[in-house]
Amino acid sequence: MDTIARGTYGGQVYISVVPVASAISTITPYVYTDGNSKSLNSVNGNAVTTKLQLDHTTKPFNDVPSNVTRDIAQQVVDYYVGTAAAGASDTDKRNLAIDGINYVNKQIYDAALNEYTSSNLDFNVFKGQSGQQWTIADLTGTLFANNLWTIHSPSFPLFTVDAQNHVPDSTTTNISYSFDSVHTGLMGLTGTFGNPAKAVYDPSAVTQLPHVTAPTK
């Protein structure tokens, strides 16, 4: 500024320009569940990779959800039904079958709740001047503008049980996670560009774990 102040009309003025470094704050997705936030693992595919353990199967099961077959789910249901007291009514046995299938579904769902599919998503779009402070409003704007407001888990199977305590073929579904500004704010309303930015998501109510309450026909 001193050089400019001492310049003369018609003369040349030289100004030194110092480049401003740009920095990326990689957005790290978390999920809020059971009263806590935990980081989500990125999966570049459409199948859950987290293994789950199922008890009460003919052989020990410790594998990914896509390998839970109808026969394996049926083994669990049969075990639960087999715990019925002598002389138990059909209703009591159906309730035990429902307990068994809900146990299977919860183990599968909990495995899926560790992951999101990163296909076609870019979490390296939150940029600014290195060291400059950003606000949660900056973060939410970036998520919205880059189709990161809602993300999804990979696919997984879910099961039901019919009135004869038989397990039909599974259906395939996934979890939709919606951005949660409240719990994101609780983790920090501000940050600085160049450091990771945490974004908390909630499982959408529509895709939360379905609870089987009655057998299908």
Image (cartoon, rainbow, N blue to C red):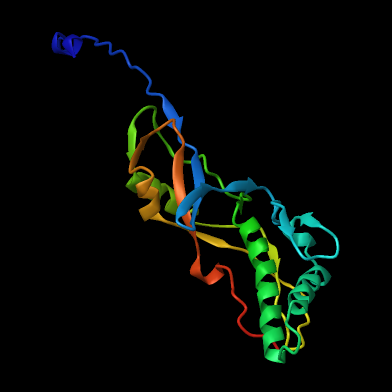
**What x and y, as percent, mark residue 176?**
55, 62
Residue 168, x across and y down, in percent: 77, 79
Instruction: Let me know if residue 149 appears in the view.
Output: no
Residue 163: image location, x then y, percent:
73, 88
Residue 209 lies, with reference to residue 95, above or below; the image says above
Residue 157 visible to the viewer: yes
Q: Quadrant of residue 12?
A: top left
User: Relative to residue 54, is residue 192 drawn left or right?
Assistant: left
**Pick the front one: 113 or 154:** 113
Please name the residue shown 36% across and 36% down the image.
191
Number of on-image labels? 0
Residue projecting furthest to the front:
86
> Is residue 89 rendered to the left or right of residue 205?
right
Give the residue drawn at x 63%, y 62%: 109
Residue visible at 35% across and 17% down in the picture: 18
Q: Which quarter shows the N terminus?
A: top left
Image vertical order of residue 172 relative to residue 24, above or below: below
Q: Which residue does the image show at 15% across and 9% down from the upper left?
A: 8
The x and y percentages for residue 108 are 67, 62
Q: Nearer the viewer, residue 110 or 47?
A: 110
Most extreme residue toward the right is 59
